[in-house]
């Protein structure tokens, strides 16, 4: 998401890229497998577990949650999106 705006513009999001410190409410950049691989997505952590996280990734439908891996940029299976 860096260098996507005009000169001098900063990214409007502050991400937590440290999976060891994840907590509910953190904003994360997550990835989606399959045909969406390579595109950056932004979401909010709703739940943090030992081996996975639940991400609210649809601003228009906050009840839609995606299960992602617990790593610096969580990975969500394309079938969930």
Image: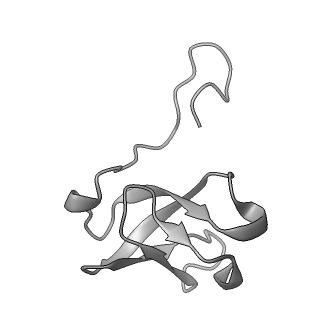
Q: Is residue 45 left or right of 64 when viewed as pictured? A: left
* Camera-nearest residue between 54 and 63: 54
Q: Quadrant of the N terminus?
A: top right
Residue furthest front as drawn: 34
Kindly indicate the quadrant of the structure image that contains residue 47: bottom left
Image point (65%, 84%), residue name: 80
Q: How many badges with numbers are in the image?
A: 0
Image point (29%, 59%), residue name: 19
Image point (56%, 70%), residue name: 57
Q: Is residue 32 left or right of 68 when viewed as pictured? A: right
The x, y position of residue 13, in whole percent, is 47, 43
* Camera-nearest residue between 77 and 56: 77
Residue furthest top as drawn: 7
Q: How is the image coloured?
A: one colour
Q: Quadrant of the C terminus?
A: bottom right
Above or below, comparing residue 72 to residue 53 in the picture: above
Q: Is residue 51 left or right of 61 when viewed as pictured? A: left
* Camera-nearest residue between 44 and 41: 41
Above or below, comparing residue 71 to residue 7 in the picture: below
The x, y position of residue 52, in whole percent, is 36, 79
Kindly indicate the quadrant of the structure image that contains residue 53: bottom left
The x, y position of residue 46, in whole percent, is 37, 76
Above or below, comparing residue 41 to residue 64 in the picture: above
The x, y position of residue 6, in whole percent, is 68, 19
Above or below, comparing residue 58 to residue 65 in the picture: above
Residue furthest right as drawn: 35
Image point (62%, 24%), residue name: 3
């Amino acid at each position: 998401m860096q260098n996507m705006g005009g000169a001098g513009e900063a990214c409007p999001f502050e991400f937590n890229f440290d999976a060891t410190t994840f907590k509910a409410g953190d904003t994360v950049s997550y990835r989606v497998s399959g045909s969406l691989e390579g595109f950056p997505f932004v979401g909010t952590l709703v739940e943090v577990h030992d081996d996975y996280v639940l991400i609210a990734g649809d601003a228009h439908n906050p009840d839609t949650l995606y299960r992602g891996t617990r790593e610096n940029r969580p990975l969500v299976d394309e079938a969930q999106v």
